Amino acid sequence: MKLSQRALTIQASPIRKLAPLMVEARRRGLAIHHLNIGQPDIATPAAYWEALKHYQDPVLSYGPSDGLPDLKQAIVAYFSRYGIGIEPGDVLVTTGGSEAISFAFAAVADFGGEVIVPEPFYTNYNGFATLAGLTVVPVTTRAEDGFRLPPLEDFEAAITPRTRAILVCSPNNPTGTIFTRDELEGLARLARKHDLFLIGDEVYKEFTYEGAAHTSLLQLEGMSDRVIVVDSISKRFSACGARVGALISRNRDVMDAVLKFGQARLCPPTAEQVGAIAAYRMDPSYFDPIRAEYQARRDTLLAGLTASPGVLLRKPQGAFYMIVKLPVRDTDDFARWLLTDWQMDGETVMVAPGDGFYATPGLGGDEIRVAYVLERDKLERAAKILLEGMNAYLSAGAGARSVEAGNLTSCR
Ligand SMILES: Cc1ncc(COP(=O)(O)O)c(C=O)c1O
């Protein structure tokens, strides 16, 4: 039987593709430090579990396609804390932020359409684009520039008659960069000039360090009709398994369309929305210790990795990831080797190879993405195992990238 082009070409998640090697390493008795995936280990808030405990309906029924009214109201109230005025009608509750991205893609572009995304980017955008029949067109950001947005001319050069939107993730997965209001306003000007949508993936909104300010696309003037924001409780409330997110837009046509997408899948999870209501209603002080913990973890990992000359990384301002450039030619091979050939006292590390975060062929092959969602002592240990592993891998021969003088200084 013949499958569709989409079925044949959709990528396997580069974050998960090493899982069989990990399972095999575990079978051999190795303990594995997971630097590869953004699964927070912080407890889901008690308020969430309490709300679920008190969920008494005898039948777990379908809810409204756009989400429970109380949750929509709680999301509106949450955004109002940031001075962002939205109404319940601007919110569609989705099955995770993932569904919000899929709905946004399907709402703004037809098959063959293009969405411009600064790379490196959250690799699952590729999967959502394939499902929607779209192409992700990358505009490259570089470690050496702190992964800041490149000049607007680079974006303009990527625009074609098929371009329908620019998607920007801030705080960024995988780089940790928070884009400034100026950078976002530049994109807004381009969007107006070329009649494009701006899609903001803001699921890491709360995770900003050293007081860095996060600007939401919803705060940009004169952009009501063009902005779609993706929100999620997965990381914010350590509730990845709840599968609750939201698509937010003040554009009525967009909201009418995504409601119909939502009706086709009936509704987002009912009981988990009840937990989400309680989580969104928590006092904002809930985030203070969590933000401090992630910041301390970032600093621990940064200190552990900058111990090695030849490793290039930038201090991330937000989210809980960093891209690390290694003096290794092929980090895909290196990441596999860490699971198949390396151990230190019965332990090894799992990292995500960098190339999966780029759409431009050849980029990211000397980078890895690491997530700092482990406790500090574990991160310290993981950094040590990673660097020792790297040195052993390089001493073993083939994997070294030639290092130009001065090219690979540690930089923050
Ligand atoms: C940038 C970004 N957007 C969206 C998602 C999807 O999150 P979820 O579907 O769990 O809400 C993730 C998950 O890792 C992410 O990192």
Image (tube, rainbow, N blue to C red):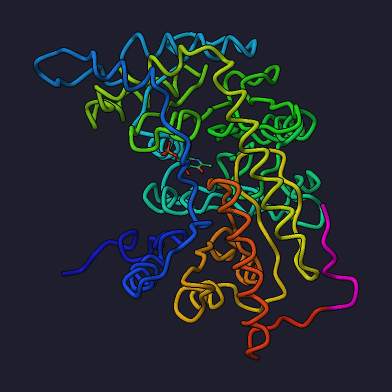
Residue 307 visible in the displayed image: yes
Quadrant location, the N terminus:
bottom left
Residue at image point 72% right, 47% down: 155
Q: Residue at x 64, y 21 (%)?
A: 223
Tell me: residue 359, above or below residue 85: below
Query: In the picture provided, is 264 more to the left or to the right than 311?
Result: left
Confirm whether the magenta stretch covers residue 40. Answer: no
x%, y% of residue 371?
A: 57, 51
Q: Residue furthest left?
A: 58
- Residue 161 seen in the current view: no
Q: Which residues are magenta?
A: 404-412
* Nearer to the camera, 64 or 278: 278
Q: x, y (%) of residue 116?
A: 60, 47
Q: Farthest front residue?
A: 345
- Main secondary-structure element of the magenta-colored stretch: loop
* Image-quadrant location for residue 224: top right
Q: Position of residue 176 (x, y in %)?
A: 66, 44
Q: Residue at image x 67%, y 33%?
A: 191
Q: Is residue 106 rendered to the left or right of residue 406?
A: left
Q: Residue at x 65, y 52 (%)?
A: 322
